[in-house]
Amino acid sequence: MRLFYSLACFWVLMTAAAFTAAAQGKSIQSFSNEELAFFATEVRPILDKNCSLCHDAGKHTSGFSIESRESILAGGNRGPAAVPGSPQQSRLIQAVRFEGELKMPPTGRLAESEIAVLERWVALGLPSPSPGSGAKLFAAGNTTHWSFQPIRRLLEPKVKNTAWVRNPIDRFVLARLEKEGFEPSPEAARSRLIRRLSLDLVGLLPSPAEIREFLSDQRVDAYGRLVDRLLSSPHYGERWGRHWLDQARYADSDGYNIDGAREIWMFRDWVINALNRDLPFDQFVIEQVGGDLLPNPTTDQRVATGFHRNTLLNLEGGIDFEQYRAEAVADRVDTTGAVFLGLTLGCARCHDHKFDPISQREFYQLYAFFNNVDELAGDQGEEGRLSAHKPILEFGTADALARREAFRAQLEALRREFQEFQTGTEATLLRDPGKLKPEVLEALRTPPPKRHEFHRIIISSFLKETDIGFRQRSAGLEAFAKQEPKVPSTLVMRELATPRETFVQIGGDFLRKGVAVSPSVPAVLPSLETTDTPTRLDLARWLVDRHNPLTARVTVNRVWQRYFGKGLVATDNDFGTQGSPPTHPELLDWLANEFIEGGWSQKKLHRLIVTSATYRQDSRFRPELAAADPENHWVGRQQRLRLEAEIIRDAALTASGLLNPKIGGPSVFPPQPEGASKLGQIQREWIANSGPERYRRGIYTYFWRASPHPGLMVFDAPDSTTACTRRNRSNTPLQALTLLNDHGYNEFARGLAQRILREPAASEFERVGLAFRLSLSRTPRPEEASRIEMLLSQQMTSFQRSPAEAVRVIGPDVPEGVDIVRWAAWTSAARALLNLDEFVTRE
Amino acid sequence: MDPVQRKLLESTRRHFFGQCAVGLGQMALASLLRDGDAHASETVQPVNPLAPRAAHFGAKAKSVIYLFMAGGPSQLDLFEHKPKLAELSGKPIPESFLKGKRFAFMDSFSRDVPKLLGSRRRFQRHGQSGRYVSECLPHLGHVVDDLAFVSSLHTDNFNHAPAKIFLNTGSTRFGRPSMGAWVTYGIGSESRDLPGFVVLQSGPRGPRGGALNWGSGFLPTAHQGVPFQSGGDPILNLASPSGFNAERQQQVLQTVRDLNQTHLKEMGDPEIATRIASYEMAYRMQTSGPELIDFSKESKATLELYGAEPGARSFANNCLLARRLVERGVRFVQLYHTDWDQHGGPETNLNESLDQICHQIDRPCAALIQDLKQRGLLDQTLVIWGGEFGRTPMGEQRETLGRNHHIDAFTMWFAGAGIKPGQTVGTTDELGFSSIENKVHVHDVQATVLHLLGLDHTQLTFKFQGRDFRLTDVGGEVIKKLLA
C-alpha cells in the first residue's frame, strides 16, 4: 500500500535555552500489553504525523527528537519535554495545549481528542517498548520487536490438570487458562469430531459408513487412526492446496480490464501433489520461489515456479508494458512479505516503512531478486503481445509441436501478405490526402516503425470502416489465427541471460530512477550468506533458513489460524510493530521449533495440532468464559467456523453423492446464474459443463479475475489479485439466496433426495436419519426428525395437488417407476438441510 | 427495546451470547415468516440487527444517496473556474507553490517541472446563487441552487484504492467498517424488505478496492453493503427454483429457521442468530425485489427526466433505483460510477472521455435532485456527490489532456436534508492548488454525514483490539457552515 503522510503539520518544540540533563522521573519500568497497544495505535500515529518531520532521528530541530522515549524525556534546547506521570508539568503537553509561548504543532492546534491521548500517554508514564534502552520508537530503529528475535527453544509450562493434556500444545494453552481461572471445554462428541476432522483435513463430509466405523471403533488410538487416514487421502492436498493458492493469488485469467485466459492449472496441480507427498515445507518454498535456478531442475520444479507468475498481466491497448511489469515485480515483493515473512513490505515501496525497520532501498533490494524474469516488458514493444505469457513451459508431443510450427509459418506468411495489402491501400489513400480526417492523415504519415498503438488503432478502424476488402481480409486473418493448434502449457519463471539493473524507484514511480541497488535482504533479519551476487534461489533458501525468525512462525501461525479461526498472532500477515502481539508467544515459538525440527513436515504439524486436547474441545459457547474472553484468545473452546466457498460446494457435492472425485486437470465450468459473467469489461460466455466435470470440487472452478463465479464470491473467496492470507467469513442474505435458489445447489438437493430414496430403508423415519447423517454427519434429535417429517408431509400434500409442479422441480428426465411427487417432496427436505447454519459450518 | 439490552445484544457478540442463554425468547421480533405460523410463537426469535433505532439526537436526514465518482473527477474542469490558471496555462508551476512543501504525488510527473494546465472548458454562472459550473454539466447547472459545494476538501492518500477506502472507512488500512455499515449499525434501517445498505455500480468496471469500500470490517457482517447488479435481475438467485411457489418456499424456509433455532439453543453462537436474520431478509428480498426494479409504474416523464431505460445498465437507471430504494426506507445507497481517472491517454483524457462520462451522469444527477424534491423526499434525503480526490492544476505530459491525482484541494457537493443550499464552502488559491479558507478534511465529511443522521461521530464507536474505533478515527469536525 502506498501511504502518503501529509506533511502539512510540522512543529518545533524547542527554540533556544540551555540544555539541561533530563530528569528521568520514574524509575525504569515495563508496561502492560494494553499500554503498549495504546502507544502503538494511538500515540505513535499522532507523534509521527505531527512531530516527526522536524523532530525525528535525522532532524533534531531545536535539539529535540521523538526518536526514543529517552530522547523525549531528555527534551531539547528548552529542557526536558516530559515528566512521566505529570502531564501538567510536561512541556510537550503545554506546547500542544497552546498554553505558553511555545505552541506546537505550528500549523494548528491538534484535535482535543489527540491532545487527550498525549496527556494520557504522559500520565501513564510514556509507555513504549523497552523503556530505558533508548529503543527507537519509529521505523528504522525498532529492531528489538519480538518477531525479529530468534525463535526460542522453550520448556513446556507446568499445569495442574495434567490429565487433560494430550500433547505439549495443551500445556501452553492450559497454563494460560489456569492462570485466568478457567477450565478448558470438554471434548466434542465423536460425530462432531469426525465431521470436524474431515472438513479440516480433506474438505469433504464423512460418509455414513465412515461415521459408523469411527463411532464403533473402541480402540484407544481410533482418533489417531482417523487422522492418519485423512492425512493420507489425496483430497488432503486439495483442501490445504486451496489455502496455499489463496496466498499464491492463483487464477485462470490475466486480470485488469482485458482479463484474457491464461493456462497455469499445472501449478495448481503441483501444489496439490506436493502437499500429498508431504514435500517438506522448506523444499516446497525453495521450488516455488527458485525452482528454475536449482541445478538441473526437473520439469516439476520448474512448474512450481508458477507461484510468482500468478501476477496480473495488463494487455490493454496503448499501455506501457513496463509499468505493469513493475507492478508485477512489486507484487512479488509484497507477496513474499505477506506469505513468508508476515511483513507489510509494500509500505516501503514509495518511502521508508513508517513503522517497521524496512527502508525503501531494502524494498528495491528485494525487488532486484524478482526483476530478471524474461517476461513481457517495455522494451519488447507491441510485438510482445504475441507471446504475452512467456516464459511458459509446453507439454506437447513432438508431433503436436511440429503441427503447430507449420501452422505458425503459414500464419506468418498470411500476415506478411496482409501487411503488403495494407501498405498498398495506405499508399492509395495518401495520394488523395485532402479526403482524410487530420488524425487519420497524421497516423498514416507516421512511418510504421514509429507508429504508436493509437496510430495503429486509428488506421485499422478507419480502414475497416471504409474498405470492405480490408475488413474481410482482416477478419479472415483473425479467424485463422484463432485456430492455432493448442498444446498444454503453464507459466513459469526463467531468468534473463543479462540481469536487468534495479534502481530505487522514487515515490514508487517506475519512471523515476534513484540509486542502483543489488539484490539483498532487509538488515533487520539475518544476513544472506553468498559469495556472488545472490539469486532468487538464494533468497528462497534464506526464507526457509532455520535462522530466519519469521517464516516458520508465520507458517505455523497460519496453520493454527485455519484450525481455530484466528492465529496466535491475530494479524497473520503483519508480524511487524503494527501487528497484534501473540496471545501465546511461547506456544508460537514451540510450534515453530517443532516444525523445523520435524523436518518441515506439514503433515506432522497437522497431526500434532489436531490430536491435541485443545483442538478436540467442543465449540459450544460458554457464557462465563465468553464474558471474560469474548474473542476466545485463551482457546478455552473450539471455534465454529463457516466453511469456505469451495468447501460449501464440496460438502453439498458429498452429501448429494454427485461428487466427481477426480484430482487435477484443466479448470471446469459448473453452472452459474445468468448474467454473472457480464460484469467485467469483456463480457464472457460461460458455457456450463454438462458431463461429470459439472460435479468437480470447488477448487477446480475456472476463475476469471474480472468476473469470478458468484457462488465463490458470495462466500468470500478472494479476488486473486493479491496474496490473500486470511479470508473473511461474512454472513449475508445473499448467501441465503444462493443456497436457497441457485440452480447448482438445487441440483445437489435433488441428488441428495434421490440418494435418500434409493437406500433400502424400512421407514420414512429411518430415511430422515440417513438424511441427517449424509448432510450433518449425525443422527437427528426427535424434535428435529419430526420437524423434517412435518415438512415432508406438507410438501407431499402440496405436490400431490399439482404433480406438474413436481415435474418442474425434478426436470423432464425421470427414470421409470420413480414416484416423482415423493422425490420432489424429499428435494424440499434436502434443500432445508443444505441451508442449515450447521451444514455450512465446521463446529 | 430497552437500549441497554440492545447494546448488549448487538454491539458485541459476546454480550449477545450472554442474553442468548437467558432470555432471547422474551424479545419478539417482527418477522414476516411468523405470520400465520403457530410454531413460531413458541420459538426463540433472533434480534434483527437492522431494526431501526433511535439516534443520538434529532436527525435531519433519514436516508443517504452517495454518488461516488470513482477515479477522482477533475474539479478544475467541472466546478472551479480559475481564470488565472487559464492565463498561466503551459507555464511551469510557480515555485512559490511548491516551496516548503513536499508532495509525493509530484513524483509521477515525469521529467521537468510540471506545467500548469488551464481548463479548456467554458464556465458559466448558474441560478440565483450564480455558481460557476462548466459546460460539461449543463443539466446540473439547472439545479445548482439546490446544491451546496465544498471546494476546499483535502484528503490523506493519493492512490485510488487507499483513498477510496479512506473516504469510506476513515482509514487507509483495509478492513475497517464503511460509512454505510456504521450508519446501519448506529440507526438500523427503516426497510424490512431490503438491505439497509445497498451498493449500485455503473461504468466500465467496479471501483478499485472493491468490496472493501462497503465492507463491515469488525462490525457484525449484517451491516455490510449489498451490491445489486445493474440491469436485469438486481440480485442473483432472487427467484425461487422452478416448482417452488411461495407456499412451498415458505415451508422450506420455516423448517430452516426452526432447525437453526434448535441449534442456536444448543450452541449459543450468535452467528446462528445472524444466519436466521439473513434468511428472513433473503425471503423478504425475494418478495419485494421484483417490485423494486419494475420501472413500469414510473411515468414516461420520470423515465425521461433521468434518461432511464428499463433493463439498461446505466447510471441513470441506478439513480432512479436509488430514489426507489430510499422511498422504501433503505438507509444508505451508494452509487459508484467509473471511470474518472483522466490522466490523459485513450479513454482516460479530459477531452472526449470527460465529455462522455459527464454525459452519463449529468442528466441523472440533476433528475435525482428534481425528482426527490417533487416527491418531498429531498427534505429527508442527503445526496452526496464526489470522488476520492481531485486532480492537479498541472497537466500531465501524455498524448491527450490529463491531470494527475490531487489531494490538497478538491470539490464535492451536497444536497437535501439539513444542507443549506446555494452556497460554496471553502476557497482555494487562484490556481486551485491548495485550500486556503475553511479547509475541510475527509473526516469532517464523515462527521457531517453522521451528524445529519443524528449521530455524534465521537460517540458512535466499536471496541476492537482493545480500543474504541470510530469512522472518523481521531479526527473530524462537523462542517457547520454547510448546515441549514
Image (cartoon, rainbow, N blue to C red):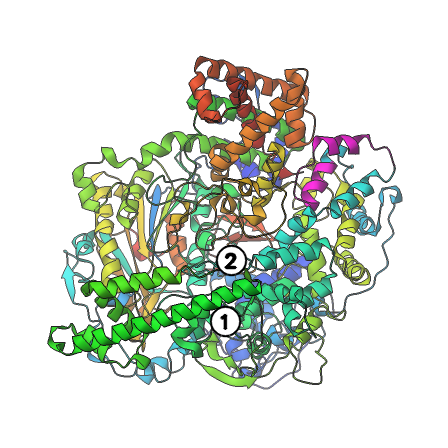
Name the mark on residue A50. Answer: 1
Q: Helix or strand or loop: what does disc 2 sit on?
A: loop
Residue at the image point whose x is 40% and y is 74% from the top: A383
- What is the crowding at mark 2: few (fewer than 14 residues within 10 Å), some, or many (at least 20)? some
Q: Nearer the viewer, residue A801 or A33?
A: A801
For the question of whether residue B476 can be seen, the reply is: no
Q: Which residues are magenta?
A: A193-219
- What is the crowding at mark 1: few (fewer than 14 residues within 10 Å), some, or many (at least 20)? many
Q: Report x, y in % for residue A240.
A: 66, 51
Q: Nearer the viewer, residue A66 or B345?
A: B345
Name the mark on residue B174. Answer: 2
Q: Helix or strand or loop: what does disc 1 sit on?
A: helix
Q: Is residue A205 magenta?
A: yes
Q: Nearer the viewer, residue A632 or B311?
A: B311
Which amino acid does the dot numbered 2 rest on?
A: Phe
- Judge from the rendering whether residue A171 lies leftward or rightward of residue B299; answer left or right: right
